[in-house]
Image (spheres, rainbow, N blue to C red):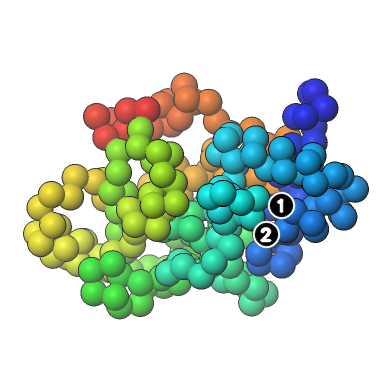
Amino acid sequence: MDSDSARDAKIRLAVFETCRRDGSPPTVERLMADLRLSREAVESSLDRLDLAHHLKLVPGTHRILMAFPFSAIATPFRVVLKDGRSYFANCAWDAIAFHPMLDEPIRVESYCFECGGPIAFEIGDGRVTTRAENPPVVYLGLPAAEWWQDIISTCANTMLFFSDAAHFRSWRRSHPEAQGADLSVETVLKLSEPLYREKMELGFARPSRDQLIQLFQDLGLRGEFWRI
């Protein structure tokens, strides 16, 4: 690992550890002080981490907006741990992904995009532990190839929860132009495993394109929507 890569790995982990501990990401100055690095070194690492999709900076700045799945701002997606700590997630998918990343039970609290009603369910031991006759639906509004074209908009506007299949169908009837995919929480949990489960480790690496394609295929997610 070259010097830039080693520094990037340390900064990435420091960002995630701070998010987990404090509920919000560190500033450039905090990283400078904690890691004894220059501003230039920290900012250049953050730029590379943004480019590599480990995090997303506020455009035009070096302030961290997203350290997937952590959100630096309030969103409709909250994750609560058994000890009472809570975090905002960037989207419905990220909320679910807290479980494999932290490897502990979580409670997801959100809202139905169709009616605004509350949604809550629990995940533990790699599965949804809340029994529901009509479980929530996760909607991904953009094809996989478009997710990273504008990840802020993708997370904020196109990765959503619906209370159940009936609410989703109702919304779909009034939005016939919508061409996204509706998934169960369980399927999104399986999608999250290889993407998030080692994020709290120094050597974390995002899955390759080929690995993602294989993951989609293994889960039966085929067709033009899932092409990357």
Mark 1, other Cα within 10 Å: few <14 / some 14–19 / many ≥20: many
Left or right relative to 174: residue 45: right
Q: Is residue 123 left or right of residue 6?
A: left
Report the front residue among 54 and 30: 30
On-image quarter of the N terminus: top right
Does residue 55 appear to the left or right of 200 in the view shown? left
Disc assigned to residue 127: none
Q: Which residue is mark 1?
A: 15
Residue 69, quarter of picture = bottom right
- Residue at the spot 48% in from the left edge and 58% down from the top edge: 90
Count of numbered tags? 2
Give the x, y percent position of residue 153.
Answer: 39, 52
Q: Depth check: 58 or 211 in front?
A: 58
Real-space Cα separation, disc 2 to disc 1, in angstroms: 6 Å
**SS type, badge 2:** loop
Residue 39 at what x, y percent from top left? 80, 46
Secondary structure type for disc 1: helix
Q: Position of residue 156 (x, y in %)?
A: 40, 58
**Camera sees residue 78:** yes
Residue 184 shows in the view: no
* Residue 194: quarter of image: top right
Q: Is residue 206 above or below residue 26?
A: above
Quadrant showing the C terminus: top left
The structure residue drawn at horizontal position 80% and vertical position 52%, both measured from the top left corner, is: 31
Image marks 2 and 1: residues in contact by CB distance under 8 Å? yes
Image vertical order of residue 203 relative to residue 152, above or below: above
The image quarter containing residue 99 is: bottom right
Q: Residues within 10 Å of mark 2 (few under 14, many from 20)?
A: many
User: Along the polypeptide, which appears first: circle 2 or circle 1?
Assistant: 1
Q: Amino acid at mark 2?
A: Pro
The residue to which callout 2 is attached is 25
- What kind of residue is marked 1? Val
